[in-house]
Amino acid sequence: MSTTQGNGVMEQIILKNDVGEDMSFKGRLFSESSYFDEETGSMTRQRLYVTDQNHQVYTIVTSNGTQKERRVYMLKPEGDQCRISNGLFDVTVPIELLMLAVRGLCGVTGREQGDNFIATLEESLTAANA
């Protein structure tokens, strides 16, 4: 697995999306990672972008050499809500509920572990939006 962090330069970006419309925005790469799944023979690349309007765009590209799947999600915080779009559908969820789901998906249990997780996530989002 590899991880990089972007250089802070905003540019016009267009991301191909197999689920909905391609996403176009002005932003910068914040982080990326990739890994190879030996069981499926697939390479997966994940990238996180930050837009000039402080939204986050998450893209996942998976390829097994013959097929490629591209998915893109834009997250727009709006007060205590977060609007998530995949280019086809939008869903708005309370940020507190979204954080609970993320903690569960990451296997975070217990109050202290959850508080540490949230603090780390908030630091990352603050750095991404700087």
Image (cartoon, rainbow, N blue to C red):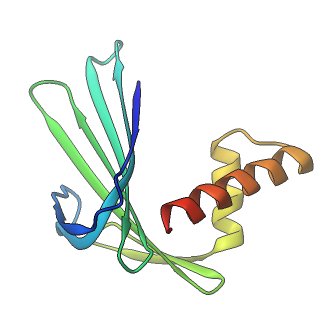
Q: How many numbered tags mark residues here? A: 0
User: Image height check: is 35 above or below 71?
Assistant: above
| Left or right: 106 in relation to 68 | right
Tell me if residue 78 comes above or below residue 123 in the rendering.
below
Residue drawn at x 62%, y 87% is: 79
Evaluate whether residue 87 shows in this view: no
Q: Is residue 44 above or below residue 79?
A: above
The x and y percentages for residue 107 are 71, 38
Q: Would residue 73 be found to the left or right of residue 19 on screen?
A: right
Between 42 and 77, the one lying in front of the other is 77
Q: Residue at image x 66%, y 83%?
A: 80
Which residue is painted at 80% across and 49% down in the image? 116
Between residues 54 and 64, which one lies in front from this camera angle?
54
What is the x, y in percent for residue 59?
A: 32, 52
Q: Quadrant of residue 15?
A: bottom left
Looking at the image, residue 60 sits to the left or right of residue 100; the answer is left
In the image, farthest residue toward the top: 38
x and y, in percent, of residue 37 in the image: 36, 19
